[in-house]
Amino acid sequence: MLTFIITAGGIGKRMGGAIPKQFLLLNDKPILMHTIEHLHAFDPAAELIVTLPQDYLTDWDEMCQKYEFTIKHIVISGGQERFDSIKNALEKATGDWIAVHDGVRPFVSKSVLNQLLVEVKSYRAVIPVIPVKETLRIADGETNATVQRDHYRVVQTPQIFEAKLIKKAYEQKYTTAFTDDASVVESIGARVHLIAGNDENIKITNPLDLSVAAIILKTWKS
């Protein structure tokens, strides 16, 4: 069985509003609902666990009633760090494979999801990435230099893992070096396998992203 842990425990300061970004409307309903619906459509049998800010649990219940959102999911209160939220969610996860996905990424393609499921059975830890399109420079104080962008990739979610592996990795104490789930798993010596992600799978973190997402939604076919 597959478990999706959908991380929506942040308060979205970069969006600049009073409402966390995962609750902002994308066309007709909150972004988070679009994400949950898409993952549920991909695998109706998958276990869905959503991490939310403690102060917004009641608000989410009210949104589900308002938008008649009835997809079954488990709600977990988010911790101080994203690491803590995932750790809490892992205690409830029962799937053999666990995929961790940003609640504000509603456009991961079905082909990417399928490829993740295929590859994780061989590699145990698999993440989607896309090439860097812009020129990159490394800066250190007043010194800076161009770097070979071919050596770098932009990381997306969902990141998928064998359940035993990710649960073992999250037994560690948190450090600031843990920027995503792959970095947590990597720290215990596991190798992370890369697959090609899809360009539409943007993370909606600012007003421009929200405008782009509205355009994608009109024409996107997963």
Image (cartoon, rainbow, N blue to C red):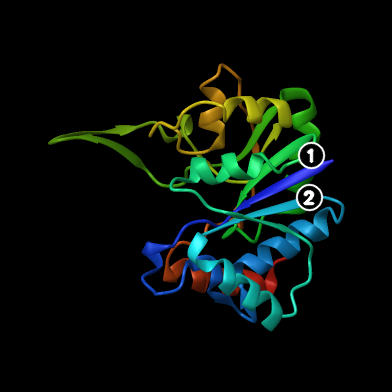
Dot 2 lies on which element? strand
> Which residue is nearer to you in this view: 11 or 38?
11
Q: Is residue 159 visible?
A: no
Amino acid type, label 2? Glu
Q: Position of residue 200 (x, y in %)?
A: 61, 58
Q: Which residue is mark 1?
A: 95
Amino acid type, label 1? Gly
Residue 14 disc label: none
**Cα distance in 3D space between marks 2 and 1:** 7 Å
**Mark 2 Cα within 10 Å, few/some/many (few <14, many 20+)?**
many
Q: Quadrant of the N terminus?
A: top right
**Residues marked 2 and 1 touching at CB (< 8 Å):** yes
> Which residue is nearer to you in this view: 79 or 7?
79
Q: Is residue 76 visible?
A: yes
Residue located 50% across and 70% down the image: 210
Q: Position of residue 88 (x, y in %)?
A: 59, 43
Residue located 67% across and 67% down the image: 34
Q: Which residue is mark 2?
A: 47
Residue located 57% across and 74% down the image: 59
Q: Quadrant of the C terminus?
A: bottom right
**Mark 1 Cα within 10 Å, few/some/many (few <14, many 20+)?**
some
In which image quadrant can residue 32 be found? Answer: bottom right
In which image quadrant can residue 64 be found? Answer: bottom right
Outermost residue on the top side: it is 189
| Side of 23 where 198 appears, left or right | right
Q: Position of residue 68 (x, y in %)?
A: 75, 79
In which image quadrant can residue 39 be found? Answer: bottom right
Residue located 79% across and 39% down the image: 95
